[in-house]
């Protein structure tokens, strides 16, 4: 991670579909920045219900800062 990098913070909610699969919904929860000393500032726009956050490096353009494609998993 390079100093000054910007990150996007997500809350990932999982729910079951009618077919019994687990579906993940990515909700943008805020932004984060890496400081010169290696620490990270996190600014949240929402609070996650389950207390879990996922942080990814942001893409260069703001319009490209969308969450990854929806991921489906089979429950077992």
Image (spheres, rainbow, N blue to C red):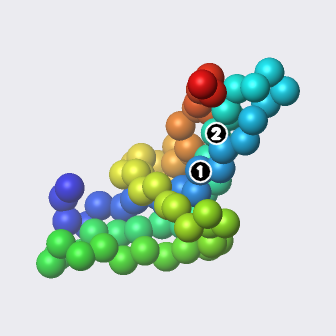
Residue at x 54% of width, y 56% of height: 10
Q: Which residue, given by chain and number where applicable, does mark 1 sit on?
A: 12
How many numbered dots are placed on residues in this image? 2
Residue 23 in percent (x, y) is at 68, 34
Residue at the right extreme? 18
Residue at x 42% of width, y 46% of height: 59
Binning the other alpha carbons within 10 Å of mark 1 as few (below 14), some (14 to 19) or many (20 upward) gives: some
Answer above or below: position of 53 versus 64. below
Q: Quadrant of residue 49?
A: bottom right
Identify the secondary structure beneath mark 2.
strand
Q: Is residue 68 left or right of residue 47?
A: left
Answer above or below: position of 4 versus 26. below
Answer above or below: position of 68 versus 36. above
Q: Is residue 47 left or right of residue 41?
A: right
Q: Is residue 16 left or right of residue 41?
A: right
Pick the front one: 31 or 53: 53
Q: Which residue, given by chain and number where applicable, does mark 2 sit on?
A: 24
């Amino acid at each position: 991670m390079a100093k000054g990098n910007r990150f996007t913070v997500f809350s990932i909610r999982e729910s079951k579909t009618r077919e019994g699969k687990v579906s993940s919904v990515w909700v943008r929860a805020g932004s984060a920045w890496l400081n010169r000393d290696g620490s990270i500032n996190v600014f949240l726009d929402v609070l996650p219900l389950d207390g879990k956050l996922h942080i990814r490096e942001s893409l260069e353009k703001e319009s490209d800062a969308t969450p990854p494609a929806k991921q489906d998993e089979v429950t077992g």
